[in-house]
Image (tube, coloured by chain):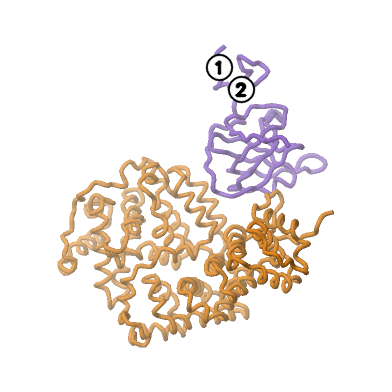
Chain colours: A purple, B orange
Amino acid sequence: MQKQSWMKLKDLTPAASNSINATVILVEKGSTIEEGKEKTKKCVALVADETACVNFQMWGAECEAFHPGDIIRISKGIFSRHKNKLLLRAGKRGSVEKVGEFTMLFVESPNMSEMRYVPDTNLPSKLVPESQLTKP
Amino acid sequence: MTVPTNPLLHYNPYEAKHQLDLSLTKAYLLLHSQLKPPFPLTIPSSSEYALLTQALAFSLLTQPDLTKINLKHLHASVTDGYDIFTTTLLNLTDNCYPKLLPVPRTQLLFLCSQLIDVAAFKVDSLVISLLRRINGGDFTEPNLWLCAELAKILSDNWDWLVDEPLVLTSALFVFLRLLADHYRLVSGPQLDELKRLEISFCIRVLRNCFHLCLGIGRDLIRLLQDLFVIPEFKELWKDLICDPCKFGVLGFSDLCDIYRIKTPRHYFLLRISQEMEAQLRFLLTHVKWGNQQRYQVWFAKKYLSLPGSETVIVDVIRFICQCYHPSKEIIQSGVISRWAVIGWLLKSCKRNYFEANAKLALFYDWLFFNDTIDSIMDIEPAMLLIVSSVPQYMEITHCLLEFLFLVVDNYDVQRKNVIAKGVLGAFNALVKRGVVHSLEVLMNCDKLSPFLREKLSKFLFDKALVSQEKEIIQMQSGDHQDQIAGMPEQAHQWL
């Protein structure tokens, strides 16, 4: 079994792969909306760790399962653009579960969903936050 | 082939399985075939024994039909005085009790009484952990059930209990505190039965083991006061005041003998749950000034949102004053101060009755303050809340000072001198140790009402009190350990 590497939110960069493993705390939860013919439930929450925060997309039953103060472990999640919004989500191949409550420090900025990402100077195939752009 | 197991814990969707649940289930799955007779006659190795005990624990908790055979197996195989078994139940109680399903919960209480029967190692700790699981301000059926079960178990095991002073006095502390809330509730057959159990248990302990009850110290009086309306307690109070010899305890001839005894800190853990304790310690150890708002909202939502649940604020304040004394490093690291958290808690009281009791909880250690046995850290939060509220939140300063003087005059009119002395001693110590530079911050505060300024002045300079104290009030602090130095600008924005 492949060993999972846990990351901090400040190191999030948008990618198509589901490789995000992080433990976060749910800071604030938006309202649940029902979309489309099947009335799929969707909800966006602000989650954070002690390095950064990010907008987390919940889908279906996830929307009712998590509440502010919950400590959540995201495995094999995806951080990518969806309808022009950068969102972290569990995705089809990832999972999300509640592992605790309250006892975690967090920050409410920077929000990785609001970052501008640009190609890395030295490795153009990789995206980095504009603020972290290295000189060639 | 999968072995069917009954669940131990309740999980909500998307909730991770608890480590303890996983290890107990694993042990059971490994050894379940060995839990049926014939049992091996060989003595297991220590790791085998540990595994067997865990498997038995899982089965006993989740398979009540097999209780008889499992108990036989447990008693036959025990080699450590039930240490591992009791410790397993203790860990379950401390870490998972709220998630236990009804059947395992019932079995847990049953097993507790079984362990008392065999005087198992650590069963005293198990009982105390279970007592902590009776949530204050929670009048739901499962919580009241736990309360009644524990009252019954302890009443039924009286002979064991009287040989366990810590359990006895802890149970008394818990049931006295709960009675104050239960007595005010609307009647019903289940509740009436519970109240009867609680009253009968408490009175039995007080009347028969008063010498042990004295060990609780001054907070015993605080608890008994709320029960004056109960006829049996009214009788007890009559004897405490008018006929103390009736209790037959050498060293007890007056309430002052109890006031003099500081309540050991571990009693204050009894009325806050294990999770609440962890959250409060986290808040006061790690969360910096300015970041506390979210945590306070979450705490309030979880513990203070149901009607009547604010009663637990009293117990939280006693815990903060007595059980959490931050180190100098923590104080200087910019972590939210105790006084700010207490200020928020006081503001969370919706009804006057709870607010008054909460203020009493905050000032209780002032009333009988004795520099030689009491800690400055017990009284520091109240003082800092008073002075830090100047000048932006004068209503808090007023409210607290008014209350303090009201309590000095009225708490125990017959022993008013003792209380005045205690409070004066508290003020002195706070200045002497540099918690505040001097009391001039209040005495010369033009935002403070003239009435209170005069009252404070009169109180501090009362010649009769001063000569009794044999101390001159120092208006300037000798050592400059100013604990409010370096407090950030936004210190007052705890609201």
Q: Quadrant of the C terminus of chain A?
A: top right
| Amino acid at dot 1 | Thr
Q: Looking at the picture, how far across and down is residue B117, in whole percent?
A: 59, 76
Label 1 SS: loop
Q: Quadrant of the N terminus of chain A?
A: top right
Chain under callout 2? A
| Amino acid at dot 2 | Val
From this view, report whether residue B348 is shown above or below residue B171: above
Q: Looking at the picture, how far across and down is residue B72, in whole percent?
A: 70, 73
Q: Looking at the picture, how far across and down is residue B170, in whole percent?
A: 47, 71
Residue at 42% x, 76% y: name it.
B224
Label 2 SS: strand
Q: Confirm whether residue B76 shows in the render.
A: yes
Question: Taking B292 as reference, is B435 left or right?
Answer: left
Q: A7 or B69, which is in the foreground?
A: B69
Q: Confirm whether residue B137 shows in the render.
A: no
Residue at 23% x, 61% y: name it.
B456
Measured in 3D between alpha carbons, the distance from the residue under mark 1 to the one under mark 2, in whole angstroms, is 9 Å
Which mark, by number, is residue B226? Answer: none
Residue B491: name its quadrant. top left
Q: Looking at the image, which residue sits at the far right?
A: B1
Q: Earlier in the sequence, mark 1 or mark 2?
A: 2
From this view, report whether residue B204 is shown above or below residue A92: below
Q: Where is mark 1, residue-wise? A: A134
Q: Where is mark 2, residue-wise? A: A128
Q: Looking at the image, which residue sits at the far front?
A: B42
Residue B254: name its quadrant. bottom left
